[in-house]
Amino acid sequence: MINRAALLLKYKEPAIAWINEVDPMHGGPGLTPEEVNSDRTVYLIADHAADTPETLEKWIKANLDVLFESELEGWYTDPAVWPNNRTYALFKTWFEVECHTVLLDTLGGLIVDDDE
């Protein structure tokens, strides 16, 4: 096991509606919840941040801007189309949080950041 927890965000209907509304190529039915949530980003966080629902909520609030911007940029790189008032209340409306605290490294080798 590694000393991390995995945090995943599942898009809810209001976020999916925003994705479909902002899409300049929109003209059809738009993306479905299944399509939007088929391949999600996994955020590795400190395992102690996920000890309780309260510590997880505190971590999310402290990292709200990073999480929100990462998810929005994954859909649209132009911040001009992002919601201006990215609050914790909006975050909870847009995302369901999943957190997993048991992570097993089946390779056992060095973990390398591809961006470095």
Image: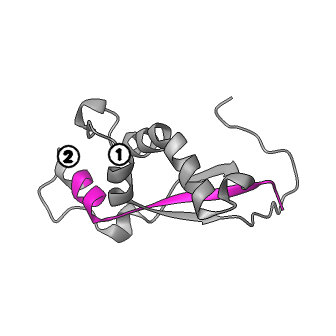
Residue at image position (16%, 65%) is: 29
**What secondary structure is marked by label 1?**
helix
**What secondary structure is marked by label 2?**
helix
Horizontally, residue 78 falls left or right of residue 48, namely: left
Given residues 91 and 35, the one toward you in this image is 91
Q: Which residue is mark 1?
A: 75
| x and y, in percent, of residue 75 in the image | 35, 45
Q: Is residue 91 above or below residue 82?
A: below
Horizontally, residue 82 falls left or right of residue 47, namely: left
Magenta span covers which residues? 1-19
- Mark 1 is on which residue type? Trp
Residue at image position (69%, 57%) is: 5
Residue at image position (84%, 62%) is: 1
- Mark 2 is on which residue type? Val
| x and y, in percent, of residue 107 in the image | 84, 58
Tell me, for residue 30, which label it has, or none.
none
Per the image, is 79 magenta? Answer: no
Give the residue furthest to the left: 27
Badge 2 crowding class, 10 Å Cα cut-off, few under 14, some 14 to 19, many 20 or more, is few
Horizontally, residue 18 falls left or right of residue 62, namely: left
Badge 1 crowding class, 10 Å Cα cut-off, few under 14, some 14 to 19, many 20 or more, is few
Residue at image position (28%, 39%) is: 85
| x and y, in percent, of residue 72 in the image | 37, 43
The answer to whether mark 2 and mark 1 are in CB contact below 8 A is yes
Give the residue furthest to the bottom: 34
Q: Which residue is mark 2?
A: 22
- Colouring of the image: one colour
